[in-house]
Amino acid sequence: MKPADFVYHRPGTSTEAADLLYRLRDDVKVIAGGQSLLPLMNMRLAEPAHLVDVSAVPELRRTDLTAEGATYGAATTHMMFEHQLVPDVADGLLSHAARGIGYRAIRNRGTVGGSLAHSDSSAEWPTVMSALGATVHVLSVRGERRIPVTEFLLGFFSTALADDELITAVSVPRIAPGTQWGMYKMARKPGEFAESLAVVQARDTGASTPAVSVWLGAAKDVPLRLEHVEEALAGRPDGSLLPADLSGPLAADIGADTATASPHDRHALQLHAVTVHRALMAVGKAPHAA
């Protein structure tokens, strides 16, 4: 199938884009890479009357680097992270995550802002950016807002964006000194969306117990911080807990009742436990940023 007729707009600045969104807000969509929106339009699941293409807006491809971290323009592509054409303030995690997104053609066109706006917890960026404490910058004719990713993502395909707002950038704090990370994605085959996705950070605080954070994607409609799992680790970020040991605290984090769970739900819980275990085992073993 082909998309329904629409009017195409190609602004030169983010301010022009925001003005278009305000004037056309009743029936308009923003497009950058188009890797999520265009398939929906081709299947007539989305039929916007207007498309505002922001891929040519220079400031949406800019990266601003500071001592605290980096602000990446919303139209920064997955490929740019993958090949470290932009600074990786997460010590290699951003590059590693981008490398697992879709296929080459998707990474060449897809953007970090588009992925967050799509809000699918099975994708890499929602979980990775939640784990890193990133902030989304959004713009409208009323001005700019900054929203923590954990507050921006409201559910499947649901965000805190108003109809006349667009994402302009994502700010990512520099990973803390002494922090090591591990990430594992469980998928049917390379390039597919995750069936389970875990990101672990372990930071040496100088005490006997390192500070560990664990985030899980593809389990609920938004990424989850696994606080019960973090407590169960009790200073063992080397993955010494087996998947069977993780199932109890993981069930508490997900809100699953193991006593009444269906076989399908028990299988999903085991899959997530294995994913978290493998992310723990990967801590400190992935390549670092160049």
Image (spheres, rainbow, N blue to C red):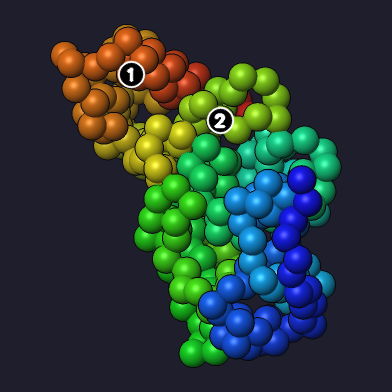
* Residue 156 image position (x, y, % from top left): 44, 47
Q: Which residue is mark 1?
A: 265
Of residues 118 and 14, which is closer to you in this image? 118
Q: Is residue 122 rendered to the left or right of residue 271?
A: right
CA neighbours of label 1 inside 10 A, class few (<14), some (14 to 19), many (20+): some
Q: Residue at x 29, y 25 (%)?
A: 250
Query: In percent of the image, x 48 and y 64: which residue is there?
Result: 135
Amino acid at pointer 1: Asp
Q: Quadrant of the N terminus?
A: top right
User: Residue 108, image x and y in percent?
Assistant: 82, 48
Residue on which the image places disc 2:
194
Residue type at the position of mark 2: Ala
In screen coordinates, is 278 left or right of 105?
Answer: left
Q: Which mark is residue 155?
A: none
Say above or below: 215 vs 13. Answer: above
SS at mark 2 in the image: loop
- Residue at 55%, 89% (x, y): give it: 141
